[in-house]
Image (cartoon, helix red, strand yellow):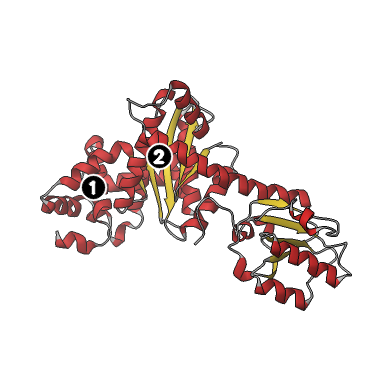
Amino acid sequence: MKEVMTVIFTDILKLPLFSKVVILTGETGLNREIRRINFNDCPFDDPTLDSQLVMAGDLFISSFYIVKDDPQELEKWFNFYILTKSAGVILINEYMQDLPPNIKDLLNKNDFPVILVDNNIPYAEIIMVVMDLIYRENTDTISKMQIDQLLNRSSNSDLSAQQILDVEKYVNSVFRKNYVGIFLTHQSNQEDTLKLIRNELCNNHKFKLQINRYNQSLLVIINFDERIFYSSTQLFVKKVLGKHGQQFKMGVSNTYQKKQEFHKCIQEARSAFEYCQEISTTVVQYSDVETYRLLLSINNSELLKEYYYKYIIPLQTEDHTDLLETLEVFIEFDRDYKTTAKFFNQHENTVRYRIAKAKKILNLEQNQLKFIEILSIGIKIKHIFEDSLEKIEKI
């Protein structure tokens, strides 16, 4: 597994731009670190002088036009790349569609990767996407340091007011009337999936999310003026995560307005995220953390078991398929029928019908407040014990 906060050759192969490349050599060297893009378009006259123009980790782009008809000179070029510990070569297939066997043997022996790329892809686009990836990975190191300061900050912080402001601006450059912090991660093939999720979130310009990498998770800041925009954004984030399976975890802070309380927002999101990883649910709101803490501290597990069987099991029978899932999302989206319907791609009346059905099953048709209260607590107990019904039976 590669070190966090570096770009390796494998990473660029996962970019959409390189989805159809051919790996000519060095499949065992795809863990080489890439530090920057470089190219050369003239013969090497003085290797000592030329080596001053490159550095370890350079990824070269070339069509090898100058040496395409000179195998000895071509080998000389590749020996130079190997000697200077370059990351590899992107070979544009305009003049060469393969490499001579002896050169391929040389490169494979040195675990040196060369990929063949279609000549219709502009050099500028290759440079842009690779450098953007490198830049993003490098800024992640700084982001982690800044987030650590926010997570560790207390009211007695040693940071000056300006230092605090600088940290906050780095993590969240665009404050609106309201903001919410979310820590999230994905638990299946985590590193690869997390990068795909990040790209999808970053590339959506409608919501303009502030996204920072933090260890094996992402910190997402949602800035908004109207509550309806927040609901739409949270729905979008959940759908992006859901595309990669339901093994994701999200911790969501309360809503804040004051910039000087930004560190509290981040601390709340992290606390909710940590609770989320301890129980069987995909999302934990910080506003629910105290309830989870209370439920987890109850020594008489028989009471929790009784509550679970009385209010949750009746909603999980074969006759009520998808009912409980609808109720969970309904509670998560703060009883918003419209947003819940959008999440399931269904009509709003379908959600209203399911909610009414649940009230009837629990005999709470005339008591909306009690229905929400019982349902919220019941769902949390379900999250605590959901790993298996055997857990419930044993307590």
- Vertical comparison of 25 with 202: above or below: below
Q: How many marks?
A: 2
Q: Disc 1, disc 2: CB below 8 Å? A: no
Viewer-side residue, 268 vs 28 = 28
In the image, is 188 to the left or to the right of 21?
left
Is 381 or 151 nearer to us in this picture?
A: 151
Q: Residue at x 80, y 64 (%)?
A: 93
Q: Which residue is mark 2?
A: 337
Instruction: Decide if residue 266 is in sight here.
Output: no
* Label 2 SS: helix
- What x and y, as percent, mark residue 154? 33, 29
Mark 1 belongs to which amino acid?
Answer: Gly
Which of the labelled discs sits on residue 322, or is there none? Answer: none
Q: Position of residue 236 (x, y in %)?
A: 50, 43
Q: Which mark sits nearer the N-terminus, 1 or 2?
A: 2
Nearest to the observer: residue 254 or residue 31:
31
Task: Specify few, some or many for label 2: CA neighbours under 10 Å numbering under 14, 14-19, or 20 or more.
Answer: many
Q: Quadrant of residue 369?
A: top left
- Relative placement, left or right, of 99 versus 28 is right
Q: Answer left or right for 242 relative to 264.
A: right
- Nearest to the eye among marks 1 and 2: give it: 1
Distance from disc 1 to disc 2, alpha carbons, whole Å, reads: 20 Å
Amino acid type assigned to the residue bearing label 2 in the image: Tyr
Q: Position of residue 54 (x, y in %)?
A: 72, 53
Is residue 240 shown to the viewer in this render? yes
Q: Locate the C terminus and report the quarter of the image it occupies.
A: bottom left
Q: Secondary structure at mark 1?
A: helix
Indicate the position of residue 356 as horizontal and vertical percent values: 31, 44
Please name the residue shown 39% across and 37% down the image: 336
- Tell me the crowding category of disc 1: few under 14, some 14 to 19, or many 20 or more residues within 10 angstroms, Cα based: many
Query: Mark 1 highlights which residue?
Result: 378
